[in-house]
Amino acid sequence: MTSDSNASGVRRLELQLVREKRLTEASTALHTTLDIDELLVMILSAACEGVAADRGTVFLVSQDGEELWSRVLTGDESLEIRLPMGKGIAGSVAQTGEPVRIADAYDDPRFDRSWDEASGYRTRQILCRPMRSRDGRITGVFQLLNKREGEFEEADESYLDSLSIHAALALENAQLHLSAIERERQSREILLVQDVQRAYQPERATLEFGPVQCAGMNLLCEDASGDYYDFIPLERGRHAIVIGDVSGHGLKSALVMAQARAFLRAFCSTVDSLDEIVNRLDACLAADLSGGLFMCMAIAVVDPATGEMHWCNAGHPPPLLWRARDGSIEKLDPTGRILGILPMPDHQEGEPRVLEPGDTVLMYTDGVTEARQPDQTMYEEERLMALLGDSAMKSPEALIDAVHDALCAWTGSSRWTTT
């Protein structure tokens, strides 16, 4: 054995000891922070030092698995890099799981020279290896450039494999921490919105004016709701009874619902014509709504002295009018389109109806008719009409309870909520 081979062996042993020490230090350091940006810097530093690379990037796989992303510091600012899965060398490694060692990057057609051209840097060697979690999933990619002495070798790849487990675990913990914080923030936000909603729309409410009795129910699910009902007092003892549904669910829908309620109450106190009230509401919502949001609504104005009911249906599921005299049921079909799409004043009142003693009007959202059994069969309008025929002589509160109980039985839940 020559002195040169002895020196080479010693050198390799020294490098191995340096790597082992660096790996031990990295495994400890990576669990001192839950900040993903700090972790990326620490992981890249440990990777570059462990294989003596000049520079590099640590990419992470996005949650949807469609791209890689990373953040790099440029001066005092952070620049985010995004790369489609399968594109370039890093994207290819993330997609296939096959590591890449390149002696000259310019000989590989997958290499994008624009980064070098913009920065003046000359990329020669590349070592690109997947970052894997303990269960073998690819969670990111190490891309390291230009070994300071010699060329990248198998020992460098082995070091990255060892570092990968620690890095993936630290990143997973950080992401779980961020997810927990986000869930807590969303929960606080939802509870706040629900508290606001309940302040002006109780879960259950009743109203009696003259011979007319009303009851309403809105059971919120775990999210904020875009469903809406309201009893609005008007002049001469009349009341407007309203039901509405904003598309989607969550905070945006709840805020649109609150906005619509405020507009509607203002217009009801200043405008006599029901179709003009709905047209003005439509114009206001259309001016503000975006992103596919819209609202359907049915409104009825009842005069207790005459029993006359004026009504308008803006794209809402038809309220059901049950007649006590013969048990017939009439659907009050839409008289205009949904609200908030185009500000076109074409909403019209339906033909007025005169309510007789014992008559019942049932207003509902599509959450009722679209309630699903475990096999996804919907409740549908026909079942609701049959239930109304059997329960219309009950009090308004008892009728609502009958609907709720039927939906609980249909869906197999103890408490039915709209979604």
Image (cartoon, rainbow, N blue to C red):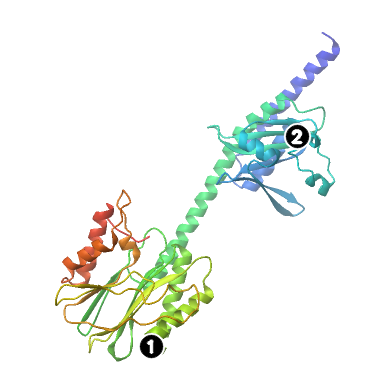
Q: Quadrant of residue 171?
A: top right
Nearest the eye: 19 or 209: 209
Give, as a three-letter code, the residue at label 1.
Ser
* Rendered position, 299 above or below 161: below
Label 2 sits on residue = 126
Label 1 environment density (alpha carbons within 10 Å; few <14, some 14–19, many ≥20): some
Q: Residue furthest top?
A: 1
Q: Give the quarter of the figure containing the C terminus.
A: bottom left
Residue name at image x 31 percent, y 56 percent: 378
Q: Quadrant of residue 10?
A: top right
Residue 413 visible in the current orientation: no
User: Which circle marks residue 273 in the picture?
Assistant: 1
Residue name at image x 25 percent, y 76 percent: 214
Nearest the eye: 317 or 7: 317
Q: Give the quarter of the figure containing the N terminus.
A: top right
Distance from the alpha carbon under mark 2 to that under mark 1:
74 Å
Q: Residue furthest bottom?
A: 236
Side (left or right) of 395 relative to 77: left
Q: Tag 1, which secondary structure? A: loop
Q: Tag 2, which secondary structure? A: strand
Label 2 environment density (alpha carbons within 10 Å; few <14, some 14–19, many ≥20): many
Side (left or right) of 130 relative to 76: left
Q: Earlier in the sequence, mark 2 or mark 1?
A: 2
Residue name at image x 49 percent, y 72 percent: 341
Give, as a three-letter code, the residue at label 2.
Ile
Q: Position of residue 386 (x, y in %)?
A: 20, 64
Nearest the eye: 294 or 46: 294
Residue 350 visible in the current orientation: yes
Nearest the eye: 185 or 124: 124
